[in-house]
Structures are given as structure tokens and as C-alpha cells.
Amino acid sequence: MSTETRPTVALLGTGTMGLPMARNLLRAGLPLRVWNRTLDKARPLADDGATVAETPAAAVDGADVVVTMLDAIDAVRETIAAAAPGLDRGQVWVQTSTVGVEGTHGLAELAEEFGLRFVDAPVLGTLKPAQDGTLVVLASGTDDALDVATPVFDAIGSRTMRVGRAGAGTRVKLVANSWVLAVTAATAEAFALAEGLDVDPRTFLESVSGGPLDLPYLQVKGQAMLDGAYAPSFSVRNALKDARLVGAAADGAGVRNGIAAVAAEHLDRADQAGHGDDDMAALYKGVKQD
């Protein structure tokens, strides 16, 4: 494998987050191979300078760093298993998908089985930060593995936090996601209550704007709910998956986290109503009693 400061990277998963991450890796001058289950989603990256691989094994063969950005634990397991013929002992595997505490533990065991150096590095941020290269990387693993992966982190994010041993990144991500879910659910419930009381939700937003109760995230998601504009930056379906992971983590830690459970109920209703691929702001559709 290469010993240069610009490691060769294999990115497995070029969906909503993976595609802009790939483009930022290329802008940083990192040699890049990409693979996606639906290859047509990866092919546009060839015009940007990436090598589009037909299989995970072809993508990872000879790479210094393997990055996974997939939507669920099963997809990560299946993809790494399919990559096995091309993997080399000592490669650094940077796992950026959000798969929960137990899922991350299982992937660390899989990495050990294949002789990979495992880095648990979920990211904070959705589509726009991914496009802008301003994600916050929650990196956890051994220092030597993190050092190899640092050019990757620098390309996709504006800040990297080294938060401890592998698995710590996922725990921090779940805490942060519990807050995101709480704010989104609380915004939707406040809007629904406003409408129920014959109050324009815009009046609520204006009443808190610029004061100690205001949040940029409240304004962004609130405006999306008001406009019914649900272009996905983080989908209802993925938010529901994460809400369930937060709930499982809380149960495992013996912590009450009722907000995650309520958010999951709202998201599930929105999903069942056909909003699974919409932005998580469409959680509002799971709160309103239309």
C-alpha cells in the first residue's frame, strides 16, 4: 500500500451523503475508487476523476483507506463481506455510517476478523455540510489508524474530533442525534398545537426569533414545515432508523429517553403516509391529525 501523505481511498456508498463526500475527496487530490449498489449513482464521479468499480472487492483492492457510507447495518456488513477478496490486512476501515452501539461493536469484530484497522467515524451534518466539506467527524480508534485517515477527515469535514477508542464516535453521534430528533419533534408539535389553538405557527417562530429560545435549526426545519418543502437532506426513513438506534442505546444504558420514542412514532406515521424519502422535517406530517 501507499505510504504517501495522500492515501488511496475506496469509498463504498455514493448516496445522499457519499456522493458529495466523494467529490470533496477528489477536490483534495486523493486518489479515489468508488462503488455503489446502484452503479448509476456512482458513474457521474468518473467525470470528476474517480475510478468507478463494478464490485466492492475491486474498489478496495490496494486502497490505503476504505470508507463505508451506507444506510444501515446490514448493508455495511454485506458490502464488507463482498469486499473481502480485495481486502488486505492492515488496511484502515473508516466506518462513517450510523449503525448504533451494538452494530458498531459487531463491525469492529468483523474488522478484526479481516485484519483491518477499524475507525468508527460517524459525521455530524447532512447534505449541505457534506457538499461544502464542513462535516464534523467524530473519529474514534487507535492513533496510528486515525493518522492514516486524517487526509480523508480533512477533505470531508471542517473539524475532526478524536473522541477515544473505536465505538466512542458512535456514542457521541447518538447523543447528538437525540438532540436533533428532540428539536425536530418539538418544533412539529409546537406547530401542530399552534394550529389547534388557531394560532399561525409563523407567529410562534417570530416570537422566539433572535431571543434565547431561538435556534438556527428551529428556523430551518420550521420554515420547511411551513412551506411544505421537504427536499431531503436527511430522510424520514433514515431519521426513523436513527431514532430507534437512540432508543436502543438508551435502553442499553438504563436511561429514559422518551423523546426518541415519541419522535420515532411521529416519523413512523410520516413514513407510512408516504413521506419516507422526504426530509425529516416531514415528521410534521406524522404529528398533524389531517
Image: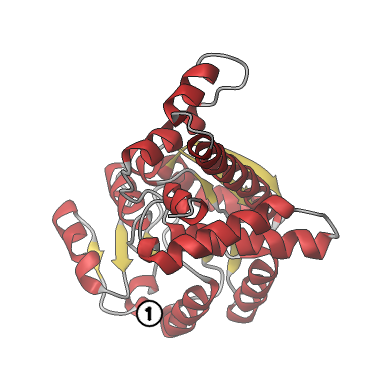
Q: Residues within 10 Å of mark 1 (few under 14, many from 20)?
A: many
- Note whether 247 is above or below 55 in the view shown: above
Q: Quadrant of residue 111?
A: bottom right
Q: Residue at x 48, y 29 (%)?
A: 199
Residue 117: x %, y % from top left: 60, 65
Residue 17: x %, y % from top left: 38, 54
Q: Quadrant of residue 120?
A: bottom right
In-front residue for pair 259/29: 259
- The colouring scheme, among rainbow, by chain, secondary structure or one colour, is secondary structure
- Note whether 36 is above or below 85 in the view shown: above
For the N terminus, the image quarter is bottom left
Left or right position of 34 against 245: left
Q: Residue at x 41, y 56 (%)?
A: 235
Answer whether residue 98 is visible to the viewer in this image: no
For the C terminus, the image quarter is bottom left
In-front residue for pair 261/39: 261
Residue 251: x %, y % from top left: 79, 63
Residue reaching furthest to the right: 254
- At label 1, the amino acid type is Ala
How many badges with numbers are in the image? Answer: 1
- Note whether 41 is above or below 30 in the view shown: below
Q: Which residue is mark 1?
A: 57
Q: Residue at x 64, y 48 (%)?
A: 178
Q: Residue at x 55, y 53 (%)?
A: 122
